[in-house]
Image (cartoon, rainbow, N blue to C red):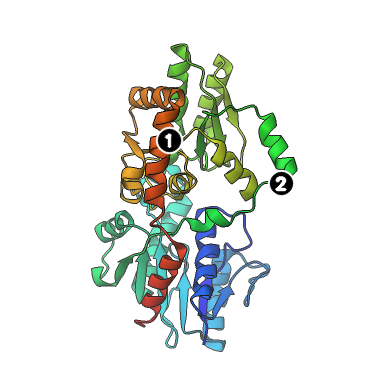
Amino acid sequence: MPVALDATLWDEPITGIGLYTHQLHRALVETGLEVHRWGARKSGEAPRGFHTRTGWTLGELPHWLQARPPTVFHALSNFNLPLLRSKRVPFVLTVHDLVPLLLPETVSTRFRWQFRLWLARSLEVASQVICVSETARQSVLERFDVDARKLHVIHHGVDHVDRVPAPDATTVKWLDALGLGEAFVLYAGALDARKNVELVLRAVERLYDGGQRVTLVLAGQRWFGSGPIEQELARVKEKGVDVRALGYLADPVFYGLMKRAGVFVFPSRYEGFGLPPLEAMRLGVPTIISTEGSLPEVCGDGALQVRPDDVSGLAEKLSEWTRSASVRREWSARGARRASSFSWNVTAQRTASIYGTL
């Protein structure tokens, strides 16, 4: 019998958990497992059609589990499990982060309550739980009554960036037309309050006030609570600071842009894993992260760390790194070495070993 994966994000714009879904599926198939995608809008072996993700998981998934029982059902999105255990099918759950509980102001009240209650129940009905970092694992243990023996840390891979198609000629011309130069600063991620984009804006503004012109590029979509960030962005741009907000970019465009960056900055106040800085490191881009959440765990000595409120410290490092090609080369090499140890094949092999215990 096949393994069934929660594919409810399969047909959506690919961001963090969606990327995890795609890459884990590909790598599991490469191990030789038969893997079915359940709950995508229109793809896979059990599409949900007109149902919402929640409606399908709670209303339709139990019927699929009874009619076509897989070896295991693996929920990939923090809590997407039925409310009752299946008599025939064991459940595995992946927990990425506890953002709605740790930073409640960054999500709606409705989602926060849904997250808390559904995650608590999913932890109960899951036979095994995968946490994407030790940081995420400790967050779960501190806030829920769950047997620590069924929580396992399995990191993401990052080698998917090696398989992204090169940008086509039109994309290259568009990137060239931006006129960004060789030492621009890039932030990639949602305009989310927890991502701490304000720190980067204020650091670049401080350099501007001191006479140093640094271009900052923001790649990412709007998010809940992004209003204050957009106001700060407008204020800094009105002042004359060169900030380019490009929004969500398709993979070939986004990674083509990332490869050109002089410095990648990701000062988030909390991440369960933190894939964007690891992607930048894999591509050889010198990377600066915050000291919070899982970022030090994941990035290790391959990225420079700054405190999430240290505007002057970040401004000082941006000034140094954008002016010194030798410093950038040093941190490029350090980041690439660290990122080389994160493989989706290893992620899949360790995940399959969890299935084998059920």
Q: Bin the neighbour count of mark 2 within 10 Å (Cα to Cα): few under 14, some 14-19, many 20 and up.
A: few
Q: Which residue is mark 1?
A: 329
Q: Secondary structure at mark 2?
A: loop
**Can see residue 102?**
yes
Task: Report whether 319 appears left or right of 134.
Answer: right
Q: Residue at x 37, y 74 (%)?
A: 126
Q: Nearer the viewer, residue 220 or 346?
A: 346
Would you identify the image quadrant in which residue 306 lies?
Answer: top left
Residue 35, horizontal then vertical, whole percent:
54, 77
| Amino acid at pointer 2 | Asp
Label number found at residue 106: none
Would you identify the image quadrant in which residue 114 lies?
Answer: bottom left
Q: Is residue 249 above or below residue 44?
A: above
**Can see residue 267?**
no
| Amino acid at pointer 1 | Arg
Q: Which residue is mark 2?
A: 168
Q: Residue at x 45, y 22 (%)?
A: 323
Q: Is residue 163 above or below residue 173?
A: below
Would you identify the image quadrant in which residue 260 lies?
Answer: top right
Q: Secondary structure at mark 1?
A: helix
